């Protein structure tokens, strides 16, 4: 009797254990931590990600949304030290091939057939590849362009050419600045950072005939071309820019233009969707666009960039992270945005199918223009004189992140009057030479 009772108790215990184990398995979740930038398109992605979680109840998304400079610092530190904080990284065309070479990123050579990799625009795909393999998938891609207020131009009797020069931009800005109305002739990036003020300033230097390095990797910052470009930039923003321009990056200038404070703005093509969106822009009915301006050299004034999603090779959740990224960069996701947020808000610049979609083309009058700008950007043949690096608004070497950040801080100091243009260039040249010598590029 006692043996039977003990045996029954034992069996009951096993049944309970099995039941608990089955319940735990049924509720086992994979937690994905996603690091992303606080740009408008990524905010929409976070909002719509509940659709992914509905379709994948075993995957839970945790978001870390950061300002651009902070994001870059955090993800670079984490991946270089194998910190393992993040499963999905928002990175760009600069980081992907460099980090892939280091073995830091998982490859995307096993995407399902219905993802349709061949639908991704070729310049974007090439920029995210290393040794023929994709190492990130593009969320949106961009070049740069000139935005302007058609109503203000009309009132002043001005006409924006399709291909403006910087001399014309200066002339227009002088005529359209009215500080008593908080109306500024030009808004440009002034916030320090290799991907903030230096993204814009690098294109300005290119078209003024300058470059970061010569063919033998000698820095060319303390040059007449850099001096001409930086002098133009500082004088233009001081005369015709908004107050506190040294604090303004992409998001700050987007807000200024959308709220009617900028007559012109030269920046990323991705802003077009937001400026033409009546729910986000007070000037949606009076936005015009033209090519990024040129100066002495006709190339290198329009950049090429893609914000992408990648997976650190050290992630414990590589398969689930890839599932999320494939969803967030798919044709289906773009359709979801178009149908739920309006087609003008669809992530631009990544897929051929987006630009053959009549709903998108109808909602986005800038669509063909942006596509052409992305296709025409040339990361190799960018500068007047030959260069050894790939990249339009950056130099595709690991050291550039530190160099660009340091030079960006010096440029911001020139903008606030803490330093002269000559002092800025001299200091930037010597600090960059030190980095390049230490890294072994030059003796």
Image (tube, helix red, strand yellow):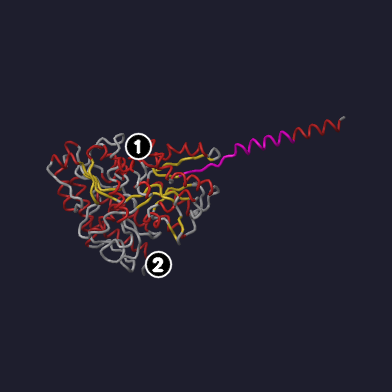
The secondary structure making up most of the magenta span is helix
Residue located at (82% from left, 32% from top): 6
Q: Which residues are magenta?
A: 14-34
- Residue 233 location in percent, x, y? 22, 52
Q: Quadrant of residue 96?
A: bottom left
Secondary structure under tag 2 reads loop
Q: Nearer the viewer, residue 100 or 225?
A: 100
Q: Nearer the viewer, residue 263 or 421?
A: 263
- Residue 363 location in percent, x, y? 30, 40
Q: State the CA–CA distance, disc 1 to disc 2.
A: 51 Å
Q: Quadrant of residue 204?
A: bottom left
Secondary structure under tag 1 reads loop
Q: Taking 352 as reference, is 57 above or below it?
A: above
Circle 1 residue: 342
- Residue 126 location in percent, x, y? 40, 57
Residue found farthest to the right: 1
Circle 2 residue: 440
């Amino acid at each position: 009797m006692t043996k039977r009772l003990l045996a029954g108790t034992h069996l009951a215990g096993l049944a309970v254990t099995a039941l608990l184990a089955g319940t735990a398995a049924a509720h086992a979740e994979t937690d994905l931590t996603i690091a992303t930038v606080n740009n408008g398109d990524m905010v929409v992605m976070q909002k719509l990600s509940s659709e992914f979680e509905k379709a994948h109840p075993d995957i839970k998304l945790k978001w870390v949304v950061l300002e651009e400079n902070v994001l870059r610092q955090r993800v670079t530190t984490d991946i270089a030290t194998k910190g393992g904080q993040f499963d999905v990284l928002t990175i760009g065309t600069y980081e992907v091939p460099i980090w892939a070479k280091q073995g830091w990123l998982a490859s995307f050579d096993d995407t399902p057939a219905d993802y349709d990799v061949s639908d991704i625009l070729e310049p974007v795909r090439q920029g995210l590849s290393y040794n023929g393999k994709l190492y990130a998938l593009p969320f949106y891609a961009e070049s740069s362009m000139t935005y302007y207020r058609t109503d203000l131009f009309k009132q002043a009797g001005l006409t924006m050419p399709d291909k403006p020069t910087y001399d014309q931009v200066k002339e227009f800005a002088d005529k359209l600045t009215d500080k008593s109305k908080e109306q500024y002739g030009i808004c440009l990036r002034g916030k320090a950072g290799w991907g903030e003020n230096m993204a814009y300033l690098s294109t300005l230097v290119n078209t003024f005939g300058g470059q970061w390095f010569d063919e033998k990797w000698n820095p060319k910052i303390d040059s007449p071309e850099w001096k001409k470009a930086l002098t133009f930039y500082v004088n233009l923003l001081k005369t015709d820019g908004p107050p506190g321009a040294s604090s303004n990056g992409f998001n700050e200038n987007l807000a200024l233009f959308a709220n009617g404070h900028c007559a012109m703005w030269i920046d990323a093509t991705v802003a077009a969707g937001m400026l033409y969106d009546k729910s986000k822009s007070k000037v949606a009915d009076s936005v015009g666009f033209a090519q990024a301006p040129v100066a002495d050299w006709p190339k290198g004034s329009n950049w090429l960039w893609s914000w992408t999603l990648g997976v650190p090779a050290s992630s414990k959740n590589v398969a689930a992270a890839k599932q999320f990224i494939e969803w967030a960069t798919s044709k289906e996701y773009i359709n979801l945005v178009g149908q739920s947020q309006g087609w003008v808000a669809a992530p631009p610049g990544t897929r051929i199918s987006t630009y053959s979609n009549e709903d998108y083309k109808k909602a986005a009058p800038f669509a063909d223009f942006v596509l052409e700008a992305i296709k025409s950007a040339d990361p190799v043949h960018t500068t007047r004189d030959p260069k050894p690096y790939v990249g339009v608004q950056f130099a595709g070497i690991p050291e550039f992140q530190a160099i660009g950040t340091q030079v960006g801080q010096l440029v911001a100091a020139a903008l606030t009057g803490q330093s002269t243009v000559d002092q800025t260039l001299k200091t930037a040249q010597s600090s960059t030479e030190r980095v390049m010598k230490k890294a072994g590029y030059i003796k």
